[in-house]
Image (cartoon, grey):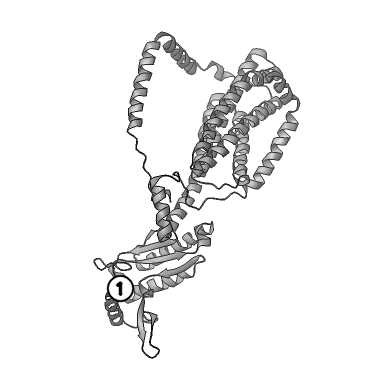
Amino acid sequence: MWTRIAKLIIRFRLALIGVILLITVFMGYHATKVQMSYDLARTVPLDDPEMVFLQKFKKQFGEDGNIIAVGLRDSSIYSLAKFNRFRQLNKDIKAIAGVNNVLSLPEIKIIRKDTANTRFYLDGLFPKEISSQEQLDSLLGAMRNQKFYMGQIVNAENGSTMMLISITKEVMNSEKRIAMTEALSKLGGEFSKETGIELRYAGIPYIRSMMATEVRKEMQIFLYLSALVTGVIMFLFFRSFRAVLFSMIIIGIVVVWVMGTLSLFGYKITLLSGLIPPVIVTIGITNAIYLLNKYHLEYSKRRNKEEAIAAVVNKMGLAMFLTNLTVAIGFLTLLATDILILREFGIVAGINIMALFVVSLIMIPGIFSWLPEPSPKHLSHLNFKIMGSFVKYIDIMVHRYRPAIYIVSMAVTIIAGIGMMRLQSVSYMMDDV
């Protein structure tokens, strides 16, 4: 079977690589549509006691996940100039797209009595224009009598105060939240620079925005670092820039497929799915090492490039297929879990690991059949003395000290089992922001 597959790959390599490139273009188009997840990711089962309690709480009291709190503790905020600057900050933040309302000290409302119309109405405690520090101090004294706000907007003990910013639902769970948060941080930075008052930010929208930004940055960092490290190791091993270059191209193709798969399935990039590209890099380099090492070994024996490539597919095809299949099945077992982001991670990872096998098996033999024959420098790794000595040492240990190996393995397993028994399942909903 694998002999026939090897002949087909070599015979139709141009057409097969062309099909892969067409699929890559299709996947690349859909990859441009993939979005970051800005929603609260459910990372515990629905029947988890903490999740059940959270759902009951939200059903009874609603959800306050659209509030950003900006706090400060500086007595100078009660000076006339800085108080007016704080009021201007309030107005500027209210003008940001996506901000529904802002509640802060300068915008406090109190209940007044309309005796002429026999009704009550809300009116601002602080007038639009405050002419002197004495007037502000008088108003602040009146504010301290508003017990509804004391301990909420203003801390009577240390004088700290905060601003509550309400975010619209349309912006809350969309990419626009990032721009809104950046605009808020920019205005806060300008205020701090002018007044010397440090602002502190809190609230689920702000934390989620920061997390989404960090996920995007770290996903790129992990991808680049994994590609760099594995590429350097591969270059040191094979001493061939071409081997590293084409291996990275193959991995890049499958990374595009990963993003396209996310888009086609309607998934978004989460903290977990963002780790799939580095996983693909690691497994892809492993496949490349398997095939290239076998290719060099067969070429050193046969001195015929076509025969060596056919032998690679024939001898390594099944082994690499089973290796990738077991890894893919391992990820697909996550389908049994009730946690949505784990299921999405398992589906996308499992499918694309098998796609990586197909792409590697087609493109590496196909590309190297067009390249020049390996030089003696490229084959030098076959006589790597340090690695050979290490493998020989392992072989001696396995054959001569098997009882000791069994005893050590059992001891480590028992210790690990004791550690597993001490693990506790703990879920905190606020850890999932």
Which of the 4 quarters of the picture holds residue 365?
top right
Q: Nearer the viewer, residue 163 or 289?
A: 163
Q: Residue at x 69, y 43 (%)?
A: 26
Q: In the displayed structure, would residue 40 be above or below residue 168?
A: above
Q: Residue at x 47, y 60 (%)?
A: 181
User: What residue type is disc 1 on?
Assistant: Tyr
Which of the 4 quarters of the picture holds residue 90?
bottom left
Quarter the N terminus occupies: top right
Q: In the displayed structure, would residue 272 be above or below residue 137?
A: above
Q: Residue at x 36, y 74 (%)?
A: 108
Q: Nearer the viewer, residue 304 or 22?
A: 22
Say whether residue 431 is visible. Answer: no
Q: Nearer the viewer, residue 160 or 65?
A: 65
Q: Which residue is label 1 attached to?
A: 78
Report whether 73 appears left or right of 63.
left
Q: Using a 10 Å C-alpha cutoff, classify the residue at mark 1 as few (fewer than 14 neighbours), some (14 to 19) or many (20 or more).
A: some
Q: In the displayed structure, would residue 279 be above or below residue 181?
A: above
Report whether 139 appears left or right of 6.
left
